[in-house]
Amino acid sequence: MKILLIEDDRHTAAFILKGLQESGYTTAHAADGREGLRMAKSEPFDLAVVDLMLPLVDGFTVIEGVRAAQVTAPIIVLSARNSTDDKVRALHAGGDAYLVKPFSFTELLANIQAQLRRSTLAAEPTVLHVADLTIDLVSRKVTRGPVVIELQPREYALLEFLMRNAGRVVSKTMIMEHVWEYNFDPQTNIVEARIYKLRDKIDKPFKRELIHTVRGVGYVLE
């Protein structure tokens, strides 16, 4: 799942992005309200975390613009402001939750999971299946038949991307952009290395292989 962070404070943004990526989420970041609103209206995401005190365009305007564009993804509002008026205004603008700075990452993560759980239950299936492989998008539990498979956050993100594209060949470039969030480097073997580790857990202990290499093109899960 992809989370959009709109936050101008460099240290706060780095703290949140690191925590989200370590938790297995794909992230995008904008450092001002104008860019954040553009990204929110043009790029798909599952949830946004929006600071109120942003340069160029403030957070209230960003939220109102997102909702005016008919984007329904949950929005968690961050702010150093703790007044009831600000909270009410942010929620009326279209925010779904309000978190006061300073906050713990655990608290933010719990809010993210709660909002994603509500939106996912309402909008789309919460479980993906390919053969006997199952991934629960809410609990983040992965099973193959009766066997529970423990994955590292990046392995989980890679598997989720493959399962969302089950039956379709995805290139190394596509995987890099969606799972690692940086541009394709033809010299890196990070994708191959992570696919190898994922196969160790998903395929090797079982009779039937699900992750296939399409030489010169990419990978397919089917």
Image: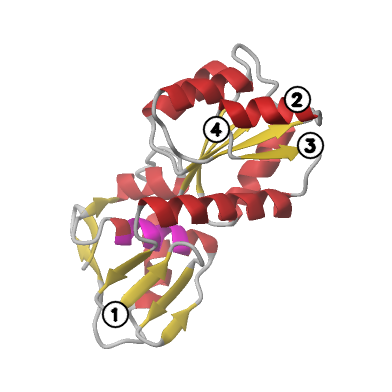
Task: From the image, tell me which residue sits under label 4.
Answer: 29
Task: Decide which of tag 2 and tag 1 comes sooner along the chain.
Answer: 2
User: Mark 3 belongs to which amino acid?
Assistant: Lys
Front position in the image: 188 or 13: 13
The correct choice, above or below, for 35 with respect to 105 in the image is above
- Residue marked by disc 1: 132
Classify 131 as above or below 190.
below
Tell me what residue is drawn at x 45 percent, y 42 percent. Answer: 181
Report whether 160 appears left or right of 35.
left
Number of numbered labels in the structure image: 4
Nearer-N-terminus badge (3/1): 3
Q: Nearer the viewer, mark 3 or mark 2?
A: 2
Q: Which residues are drawn in magenta?
A: 156-163
| Secondary element type, mark 1 | loop
Q: Earlier in the sequence, mark 1 or mark 4?
A: 4
Of circles 3 and 1, the one toward us is 3
The image's mark for residue 101 is 3
C-alpha gap between disc 2 and disc 1: 51 Å
Spatial CA span between label 3 and label 2: 16 Å
Nearest to the eye among marks 2 and 1: give it.
Answer: 2
Disc 1 marks a residue whose amino acid type is Asp
Q: Are marks 4 and 2 in contact (CB under 8 Å)?
A: no
Q: Earlier in the sequence, mark 4 or mark 2?
A: 4
From the top left corner, tell me how far across and down residue 203 is, in percent.
32, 79
Q: Earlier in the sequence, mark 4 or mark 3?
A: 4
